[in-house]
């Protein structure tokens, strides 16, 4: 492994390995992630690129976010926009289906600790164990939603909810 070209993403220090400098850093905290999304929003050439960069950032900065995507509300359907992770068969989800449909219909964040115990769940990957869906709401209307799957059971905490609801606010103001 070439540490000079490929920084290792664990908490630690910078230093030298043999004759090479290496960088080791901690994951961004919630404030840093939100600051980065706001910076992306300020410079993004389009809503699509803002969404694409945001899902990549979230995937990169939170190891328990195994699949990160944004669904856009079009009529009575959620249509898959930018995502990072394995392809999903659920590229269009009616509002009365899935955890995604339930979150969009209620306008409220949904956290499901055990997707296999939730009859609403539409499976996207066999590895997925838990899910969070956060609506992106502008002036009382749902525009879209952030959907994240984790391979860990009960992976999503109040800290994730706080982060993602703030991220959704930035997106709502900039899409
Ligand atoms: N699990 C979602 C479907 C989308 S995939 O997770 C990407 C649901 O139940 O609505």
Image (tube, rainbow, N blue to C red):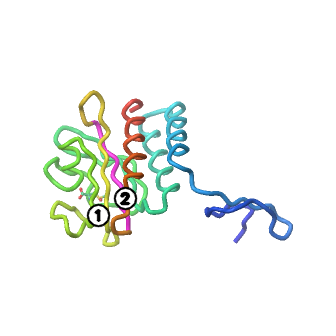
Q: Quadrant of the N terminus?
A: bottom right
> Is residue 109 found inside the magenta-colored segment of the image?
no
Q: Mark 1 and mark 2 in contact? Answer it, CB < 8 Å.
A: yes
Coordinates of residue 108 in the picture (x, y in percent): 24, 44
Residue 113: numbered disc: 1
Q: Give the side of residue 115 with respect to residue 8, left or right.
A: left
Coordinates of residue 14 in the picture (x, y in percent): 75, 59
Q: Nearer the viewer, residue 27 or 65?
A: 27
Does any atom of ligand 1 lie closer than 8 Å to the CB of label 2? no
Coordinates of residue 168 in the picture (x, y in percent): 38, 40
Going from the N terminus, do you reach mark 1 or mark 2 first? 1
Q: Quadrant of the C terminus?
A: top left
Quadrant for residue 73, please give it: top left
For numbered disc 1, what is the local secondary structure?
Answer: loop
Q: Nearer the viewer, residue 147 or 2?
A: 147
Coordinates of residue 173 in the picture (x, y in percent): 39, 30
Measured in 3D between alpha carbons, the distance from the residue under mark 1 to the one under mark 2, in whole angstroms, is: 7 Å
Looking at this rendering, what residue extends furthest in the front direction? Answer: 158
Q: Nearer the viewer, residue 169 or 91?
A: 169
Above/below status of 37 relative to 29: above
Give ligand 1's quarter of the image: bottom left
Badge 2: few (under 14), some or many (20 or more) residues near its Cα, within 10 Å? many
Looking at this rendering, what residue extends furthest in the left direction? Answer: 96
For numbered disc 2, what is the local secondary structure?
Answer: loop
Which residue was labeled with disc 2?
156
Q: Nearer the viewer, residue 47 or 128?
A: 128
Q: Give the extent of the magenta segment.
A: 143-151
Q: Residue at x 19, y 44 (%)?
A: 77
Q: Residue at x 65, y 64 (%)?
A: 8
Q: Residue at x 34, y 72 (%)?
A: 127
Badge 1: few (under 14), some or many (20 or more) residues near its Cα, within 10 Å? some
Looking at this rendering, what residue extends furthest in the right direction? Answer: 19
């Amino acid at each position: 492994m070439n540490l000079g070209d490929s920084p290792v993403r664990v908490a630690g220090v910078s230093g030298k390995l043999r004759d090479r400098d290496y960088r080791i850093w901690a994951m961004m905290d919630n404030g840093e992630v939100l600051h980065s999304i706001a910076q992306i929003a300020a410079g993004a050439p389009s809503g699509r690129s803002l969404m694409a960069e945001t899902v990549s950032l979230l995937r990169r900065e939170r190891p328990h976010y195994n699949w990160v995507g944004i669904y856009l509300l079009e009529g009575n359907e959620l249509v898959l926009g930018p995502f990072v992770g394995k392809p999903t068969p659920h590229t269009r989800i009616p509002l009365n289906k899935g955890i995604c449909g339930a979150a969009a219909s209620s306008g409220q964040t949904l956290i499901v600790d055990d997707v296999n115990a939730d009859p609403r769940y539409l499976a996207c990957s066999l590895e997925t164990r838990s899910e969070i869906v956060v609506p992106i709401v502008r002036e009382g209307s749902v525009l879209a939603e952030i959907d994240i799957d984790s391979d860990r059971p009960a992976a999503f905490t109040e800290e994730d909810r706080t982060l993602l609801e703030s991220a959704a606010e930035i997106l709502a103001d900039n899409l």
